[in-house]
């Protein structure tokens, strides 16, 4: 089978790893990379022995598909251009800034019969892959995603930068309509919300609680699923998970614990391999644009809830000046 010709648009913090992995995949020919920073683009092109294109149109003319890892405010513009030029696309999360933009991208991809996969990378986390089959009917879900401050992704609220990962995971395993959302957020080191908490109640009674911060001292990425007779604790960072289950001994209940068997792998590599396989096999991507649109819609509702409380935040800020 012939190689797929691929390129990467946006080779900053994350996109450079797209280039690295595409270069490693034997079934892929990394044709080139494109970046608004000529210096960064040339550096990554040299590092992975490929070509640098200042104009993405020149790159798109020579590939079958691209991955796009540009800042969120440019997702719609770049993705639309890629699709209109008839190229398959892996677009980093979130799919766009608005639901209407997401719907337009889905419409174009469907009309042009192109594959549009969204980079919700935690779907490819080995701990998630191994653990989610045990998640049957969770009553309560608790997610913590905390990180030290980096001057990256601060052009959007932390809900889009980090929390959206956990939103996507929860939506993928709770088959119910959202009934109510409550949320609060605070800008700390940027103009956007740097720390946020959201509580989502579903029609089936499931409650999910999300805490996300990009101004924490240490990294933490964990999610726990509590069920009537068990709970699953997943550590995204360490690719580990534990399964706690109610059992009986002489009619006396107790909690047993076991580590879930996980085959470790790099999530991004699994994601990009999946993208390539979907193109080759003409199958739907593991993370569809429609699923990504749903995650974005929930993230938007959370942000609106926080904005509705903005007067309270500003009042507290002024009280402590």
Image (cartoon, grey):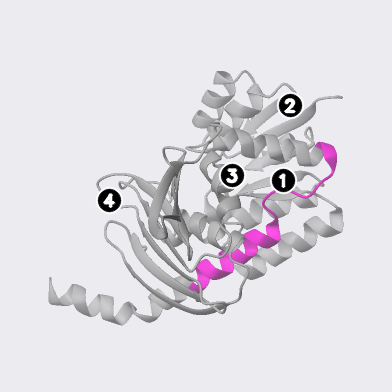
Q: Contact, CB < 8 Å: mark 1 with mark 3?
A: no
Is residue 302 shown above or below 12? below
Q: Residue 44: image x %, image y %? A: 54, 26
Is residue 177 shown above or below 173? below
- Report the span colored magenta: 280-301
Give the alpha-carbon distance from disc 1 to disc 2, as whole Å: 15 Å
Q: Going by the picture, which residue comes out furthest to the front?
A: 250
- In terms of sequence position, does the residue under pointer 1 or pointer 2 come before the other? 2
| Rendered residue at 64%/22% (across/down) | 24
Give the alpha-carbon distance from disc 2 to disc 4, as whole Å: 38 Å
- Given residues 11 and 205, the one toward you in this image is 205
Q: Secondary structure at mark 2?
A: strand
Is residue 310 shown above or below 10? below
Q: Which residue is mark 2?
A: 28
- In terms of sequence position, does the residue under pointer 3 or pointer 2 come before the other? 2
Q: Secondary structure at mark 4?
A: loop
Give the alpha-carbon distance from disc 3 to disc 4, as whole Å: 27 Å
Q: Is residue 56 visible?
A: yes
Q: Which residue is mark 3?
A: 129
Q: Is residue 53 visible?
A: no
Q: How many marks?
A: 4
- Given residues 60 and 232, the one toward you in this image is 232
Q: Which residue is mark 1?
A: 89
Name the front one of labels 1 and 4: 4
Q: Secondary structure at mark 1?
A: strand
Q: Is residue 218 left or right of residue 285?
A: left
Give the alpha-carbon distance from disc 3 to disc 2, as whole Å: 25 Å
Name the front one of labels 1 and 3: 3
Q: Is residue 261 left or right of residue 183?
A: right
The numbered disc on residue 216 is 4
Give the alpha-carbon distance from disc 1 to disc 4, as whole Å: 34 Å
């Amino acid at each position: 089978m012939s190689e797929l010709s691929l390129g990467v648009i946006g080779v900053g913090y994350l996109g450079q790893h797209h280039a690295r992995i595409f270069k490693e995949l034997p079934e892929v020919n990394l044709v080139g990379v494109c970046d608004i920073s000529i210096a960064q683009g040339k550096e990554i092109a040299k590092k992975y022995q490929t070509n640098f294109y200042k104009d993405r149109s020149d790159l798109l003319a020579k590939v079958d598909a691209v991955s796009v890892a540009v800042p969120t405010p440019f997702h719609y513009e770049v993705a639309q251009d890629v699709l209109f030029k008839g190229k398959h696309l892996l677009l980093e999360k979130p799919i766009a800034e608005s639901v209407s933009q997401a719907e337009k991208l889905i419409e174009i991809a469907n009309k042009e019969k192109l594959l549009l996969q969204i980079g919700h990378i935690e779907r490819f986390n080995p701990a998630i892959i191994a653990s989610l089959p045990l998640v049957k009917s969770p009553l309560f879900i608790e997610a913590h995603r905390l990180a030290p401050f980096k001057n990256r992704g601060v052009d959007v609220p932390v809900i889009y930068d980090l929390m959206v990962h956990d939103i996507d995971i929860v939506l993928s395993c709770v088959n119910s309509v959202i009934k109510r959302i409550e949320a609060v957020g605070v800008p700390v080191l940027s103009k956007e919300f740097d720390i946020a908490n959201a509580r989502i109640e579903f029609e089936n009674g499931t409650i999910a609680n999300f805490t996300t911060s990009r101004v924490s001292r240490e990294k933490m990425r964990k999610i726990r699923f509590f069920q009537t007779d068990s709970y699953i604790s997943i550590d995204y960072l360490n690719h580990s998970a534990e399964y706690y289950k109610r059992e009986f001994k002489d009619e006396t209940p107790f909690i047993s614990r076991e580590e879930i068997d996980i085959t470790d792998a790099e999530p991004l590599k699994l994601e990009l391999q999946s993208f390539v396989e979907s193109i080759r096999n003409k199958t739907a991507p593991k993370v569809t644009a429609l699923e990504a649109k749903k995650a974005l819609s929930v993230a938007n509702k959370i942000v609106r809830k926080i904005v509705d409380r903005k007067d309270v935040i500003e009042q507290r800020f002024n009280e402590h000046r």
